[in-house]
Image (cartoon, grey):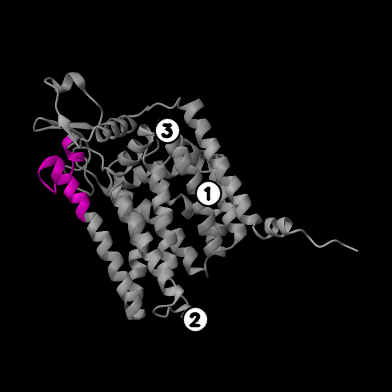
Amino acid sequence: MNNPPSRISQLLRSHRGGIIAFLLAITGFLASAFVTQRVFEAIPHIEDEIAYVWQAEALIEGHLKVASPPQPKSFLVPFVVDYQGERFSKYPPGWPVVLALGILSGLRAWVNPLLAGLGVWLTYQLGKRFFSHLVGLLAAALTVTSPFFLMNSGSLLSHPFGLVLSSIFALGWLEAFWQNKAEEPVAGLPGARRRWGYTVIAALALGSLILTRPFTALAVALPFAIHGLVIVFRADRAIRIRLLVFCLLAILFIGLYFLWQYMLTGDALLNPYTLWWPYDRIGFGPGIGHTPTGHTLQLAWINTRFSLQGGSSDLFGWGKFSWVLLPFGIWTTRRNLKGLLLGSVVLSLVLAYMAYWIGATLFGPRYYYEGLYSLT
């Protein structure tokens, strides 16, 4: 006679997907920490990282900006601007605030590895909720084994924080605004309150991404904005009200971004990036980029091609075959509209960053990093 399974065995069996995902998240954290400590030696290496650390330390002292030294060029800090007698970083404040918390707690080198582990967990959640447990686990496993993921997660760059925010936004949006007719919320019931919660979470995540990587936030949000336009014409009044609240919260964060620019430069529309390089702007034409003709569609294609070529090697470390599974993934997702919306995030990032005059191949095509779950 067989003994009935114990309660612990039943719990382990019923939650085995979550347990495996948790172990993958821990693995992602440990692998990223190894890269931080053994490869990058827990110090900044590129100009962006140096500027982020400088900005975080200034924030710890309670300063958005400080007085410029008497001879600013003799005390150059990369991507830290001297303007009208004051010195400040060109970067938005979102990631430096998080990095400052890490410095205050003595855990600067551990912030991105911790975010990396959270990113793996969120990737699993996206896959589980909108595909299946197996897809979520496979996506999380692919993320953990990605050199592209590990290189950026071991750095002091803002991208791991951006990936977490992008994932939370995508998860919150789909939970809040994607419903079947059978799932229509009823005012006052727990389902309606739950969707309100996800609406606020999605707005806060997108808003934080605006304050961290504003152009990336625009690219990540674009496919969901198109979905939002669709549901405006198809949804009932309750959903439209939630969508309006979401938009108002997002606009609030946009206002905070312009307030930050005003506090630094005295002009809400003056982008600090242009104070370091006047040509460092989004768009096409003369004066954008460092070539005499400015940024052009031809240069955009060249940058994109090099970025994608770098990604073909760095994505999963499979040489030029990192993209080999994508056609099969697209085919099997063709009838999963939620999956197609998630999958469109990386496409939106690729298309949007064609309007930026410089590509990204150092640490892989890192401008696409916030859409990594869209690939896995």
Dots 2 and 3: beta carbons under 8 Å? Answer: no
Task: Determine which quarter of the picture holds residue 248.
Answer: bottom left
- Residue 237 is left or right of residue 254, and the answer is right
- Residue 261 is left or right of residue 33, and the answer is left
Q: Nearer the viewer, mark 2 or mark 3?
A: 3
Q: Earlier in the sequence, mark 2 or mark 3?
A: 3
Does the segment drawn in magenta span residue 368?
Answer: no
Q: What amino acid type is highlighted by mark number 2?
A: Ala
Q: Earlier in the sequence, mark 1 or mark 2?
A: 2
Dots 1 and 2: beta carbons under 8 Å? Answer: no
Q: Nearer the viewer, mark 1 or mark 3?
A: 3
Tell me the SS state at disc 1.
loop
- The percent coordinates of residue 173 (x first, y second) are 40, 64
- The percent coordinates of residue 144 (x first, y second) are 55, 43
What residue is disc 1 on? Answer: 323
- 358 in relation to 218, above or below: above
What residue is disc 3 on? Answer: 107
Alpha-carbon distance for marks 2 and 3?
47 Å
Q: Quadrant of the N terminus?
A: bottom right
What residue is disc 2 on? Answer: 182
Residue 136 numbered tag: none
Main secondary structure along the magenta-highlighted residues: helix
